[in-house]
Each structure stands twice: as structure tokens, then as C-alpha cells.
Image (cartoon, rainbow, N blue to C red):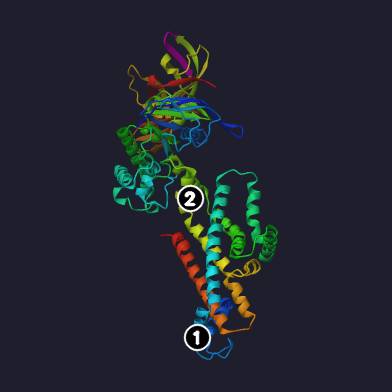
Amino acid sequence: MYSRLSNILCGTYFITIYSFIFLPVAVLVLYSFQDGSLPIPPFNGVTLKWYAEVFTDSKLMSALANSMIVAVLSSIIACLLGFCAAYALSRYRLPASAFQRVLITAPMTVSYLIIALGLLVLFNWMGIRLSLWTVGVGHVVINLPLCFAVIYASMGDHQKNIERAARDLGANNFQVMLLITAPMLMPSILAALFLSITFSWDEFIISFLLSRFDVTLPVEIWSLLRSGLNPKTNAIGSLVFLLSVGLLIILEIFVFRQRSPK
Amino acid sequence: MTANVSLLKLSKSFDGVAALKEVSLEINAGEFIVLLGPSGCGKSTLLSIIGGFLPASSGKVLIGGKDMTSVPPSIRPTTTMFQDYALFPHMSLRDNVGFGLRMRKIGRKERNHKADTFLDMVGLKASADRRPHELSGGQRQRVALARALSVNPDLLLLDEPLGALDMKLRRQMQDELKAIQKEIGTTFIHVTHDQEEAMAIADRIVVMNQGVIESLGKPSDIYMRPQSLFSAGFMGEVNLISGIVASINGPQYNIETKIGLLILSSDAFVNSEPNVGDEVTLCIRPEQINAGSIVSDNLTPLNQAKIVNSAFFGTHFRCLLAPGLAPELRLIAHLPQSEEMLQGSVVDLVINPANVTAFPSA
């Protein structure tokens, strides 16, 4: 009796929480197929017209390409810098290393808006024109602490001994890092990479404030939204969601497949 | 390849605490040396200094006559077999073993061939394409050995490599290590806290305690004629019996002890011969005490003793004895398995004084 009640409660909780998380996305995806000009009930029928419009909209397509380039490049740079910082802090005795660790992770606690404003002022002062490059710099700034934290957490003393063995067999510091440390930490490096790609892909405030003529997808969607609701925005939103899910699946395969016990 | 090693007055301190105190040691080329001691005695520190992983506070390391004190591990003619094996988890066994050759810029074909040869030597050729996590502890051990030997080091350092293996596998690996060492002739320095392991494999044992070398010699010498009370106690069970030099009669020393009068020759005193009236401590191994009343020329009777406790150990009975003359004392003796050693029974004891060593009492 008791267990049946708790089963029902658990089931209800399960359904509620997943509906809460995924209902908005489900509605978004559903109305991207709306055969009509408004993405609101009633649902009139299925059409792929809006997707066709998305793919023929050159502004949206170039924004999508921009987003991909910025996400991939900025994430690779953030990962590289994060890995180097993590390696240095875990393998060498640095002055004030605890303070340095805090300093590197601190930007995580600062709001994106503040970071964007700071960078905007800085770029102005240095006379650097706003472009995709400045957006990329902004994304490196926000993703570097994340990459550092993920990679640093996976560097343990066991690997230290393995690096020692490599050095003992004749490897120099660079070879140790490239041939031993990086491959050993590949699951967490990839986790950091894919996480920061998804963050960069979705990021709006920094992209909005630090771009000018070439914009990223979230900025383009925002300007679409200003002209009112339209199933086309649902279609592009669904595509963004699909790509994020795709990244998440890759992440799962790379990170969790390797960690699962054999 | 092989080389001799000279350690000259090596010292090391960590935050002001001395871990090694002016340790000097000469090791011949092709020798199998075991550094033996309790944890914290400085044996692993010494190994790390020889391997180049720790800088010495003072002193020198010479390998093959060349000063290696400040040469980094990657350039030293040494390799190390680590306690946790430290295999590269993302590489196949072949790539693990070939890594050192790769660092020496040897082409893939040649190094794979060489790696396979070394894997064959340790009996793992068939598993060359597998990853370390697919192997058992003993197999990983063998890969670590093959990897360390693949670059033809002059000197192989083994840091408690058998510690994680079960007893049977450990004995088997000891035999293999010894056989491989004899075959290739490389100088081995092996660290362990297991005295049986040390005796099984070493050409010479170096007993260490609190940062200094206590004893140095062949396993049989270290066991039978320890150079200090510490070594005597560390190399297996020993009865320590204090006595007083009652009289000296030429080469004969008459020692008055609680269990009776023992006549020792001057050979029994390892460090310095005592004077009349000096207090000494005698070291008697449990297997040197025998039961029986046969009195031959080289056996001395030790009076009777009562068996307080007796346990069967397979090769012998380990008995706790209360000597008749000093019932409060306890002697440990290994008595033959052939006779039933019942608790409470009284036996006659004999001892061969030639096997007793003595030290001045501290």
C-alpha cells in the first residue's frame, strides 16, 4: 500500500518535472510545423514551409555560419588556454597558486552583461572595431573559467606518476603534455570543449553588444522577434535546439562511454 | 647495458627534517641490490634521487663513473618501474613499451619490432594490441618491466614493484625478475620493505633505517651476521638476550645470561670485542634453538624449557618457550615439524653458539 502510493508520487513528480522542462521546447518545435502565419493554437496542420523559408533566408544562414565559426574557434581557444592554466597550476609550484585559481574562475560569477560592458569599453578605448572577432574574444572570456575548472578537476596525482614515467623514458615537457597528459585527459577536455561550444552557441548578450554588421544567430533571431511572432522563428529555434541536442549526444558518447565500467 | 653506481655522501632533508644522512654506497655493474627498510627509512627517497626525480640536498650520484647529480631523468641512463606501474592508459601495450624508443627517434617499424621482442620476453606478445586496463595486476607489472627495459638502461630502479601482488604471484615475479636480471646483466636497484623478498632476489641487501645504512652484505650474511641490532630485528624473528661478559679465556668469551652460561668465540662480536664485565645483547634466531639432549662438540645445552604456546607453520612448529632458569622470559624457537610439540610439555634445548651474534648493549 505504502509502496504503491510512493510509486504514484514518484511517477507524478517525474512527469511534472520533465513536462516543466521540455513542454516549452515541445510547443516551440510543434508550432514550427504550423500551417498558418501564427505560432499559436489552434494547430492547423503540418507544413515544412517555414523550414524552407529559414534555409532560403541568406541573413539567417550567414548568422548560423557565423555562430558556428565563433562557437568552435572560441571554444578551442578557451580549452587550450584552460588546459595550459590547469596543467601549470596542478604540476608546478606557482606563487599564490590558490589566489591564481580563484582569479581564473572568478569571471564565472560575474554576469555576462557586466563582462560585455567591460569589453565594450576596453575595445572602444583601444580603438578596436566591433566584429565577430570581438564576439569571439568575449566568448573566450566567459568559457575559459569553465574549461579551466572542468580540466583542472580531472588532473590527479595518479597522472603525475604517469607523466613522471614518460619523462623517465626520455620525453621532454612538451612531449609529456602533448603525448601523455592531453590524451589521458581527453574525456574531460572534450567535455569542456562541447560545453563551451553549446554555451557560445546560445549566448546572446555578449554577441549582441560586441557585434556590429556580422551577427551571430541569437542576435539575428532577436531582430526577427522584434517584428512579431512567426512560425519561422519557431523553425530556426527548433534547428538551434536540434544542434544543441546533437552536441549533447556527442558529449555523452565521448565522456560517459569512457567512464562507464567495463 | 650495465654500469656501476657510486653514491657519495648523499643527504636529503624535507623542510628541515633529514630523510637521508650522508649515505655512501658502491654498487658494481650487473649487481642486484635491494634497499630494505621500514617505511620512512629513506629508501624510496634514495631511489628517487638516483632516478633524478628528487634533487639531493648534498652529495653526488655517479653512474658509470659520470656525475649525474644534476642530470634530469630523461637524459639519465636509468629507468624506473613504478609502484603503481604508471602505464599509459591511452596506449596499447606495444605503444607503451615502444614509448621510450619513440622518444629516441626510432622509426615505427623498428620500434614496434623491438617492443614486441620485449613483450615476448615477459610473455605478453599475444596481447600487444590490448590496453593496460584489460590486464591483471601481474600482467601490468610485466608490461612496466618491459617498458623500462626497452631503452636498454644501464640501471633499472624498482620502487616496491611487487607490493600490490598477492603472495603466490609475488614469489613467481621475484623469480622472473631475478632470471631476467641475470640474462640481461643490467644493474638493478630494488626497493622493498619485505625481508623475504629481499633475500629471495638480492645479490646484496642494503638495510636502511632513519636515513642511514645499517647493514650491507649478502642475504645470508645480513641474516646470519647482522651488523646491528636493528638489522637483526628487521631481518625476521630474533631472540634478544642480554648478558654480562663473565670472563675471557683467550678466544673464548664466557657470557653469563639468564638462560645459562654461553661460550662464544670472538667471531660472534660483529662490531668490537667486549671487556670483562661489559653488558652485551645476544641475537639468537628461532631456528638455531633445537630440542633434544644430544650434546655434540658444537652444541651447548640450554637447560630445560616449558612450551607455553605452539603453532604449526607447515615447515616447523613455532613455539613460545619459558626457560627453566628464567620462567618469566619467553624464547621463540622453530622446532622440527616431525615431533608433536604439545603445549605444557617440557623439552631440553640445545644451541649452536657459532650461530649467535652479539652486540654491546645500548
Q: Is residue B289 visible?
A: no
The residue carrying mark 2 is A181
Amino acid type of the residue tagged 1 in the rendering: Lys
Residue B21: image location, x then y, percent: 54, 27
A44 lies above or below B193: below
Residue B281 covered by magenta stretch: no
Residue B288: image location, x then y, percent: 38, 26
Amino acid type of the residue tagged 2 in the rendering: Thr
Q: Is residue A92 visible?
A: yes
Residue under the point 42% across and 45% down: B85
* Quarter of the figure with the C terminus of chain B: top right
* Quarter of the figure with the N terminus of chain B: top left
A147 lies above or below B326: below
On the image, which quarter does residue A136 sit in? bottom right
Looking at the image, residue A42 sits to the left or right of residue B5; the answer is: right
Host chain of mark 2: A
Residue B237: image location, x then y, percent: 44, 31
Q: Nearer the viewer, residue B6 or A137?
A: A137
For residue A49, which numbered disc appears in the image? 1
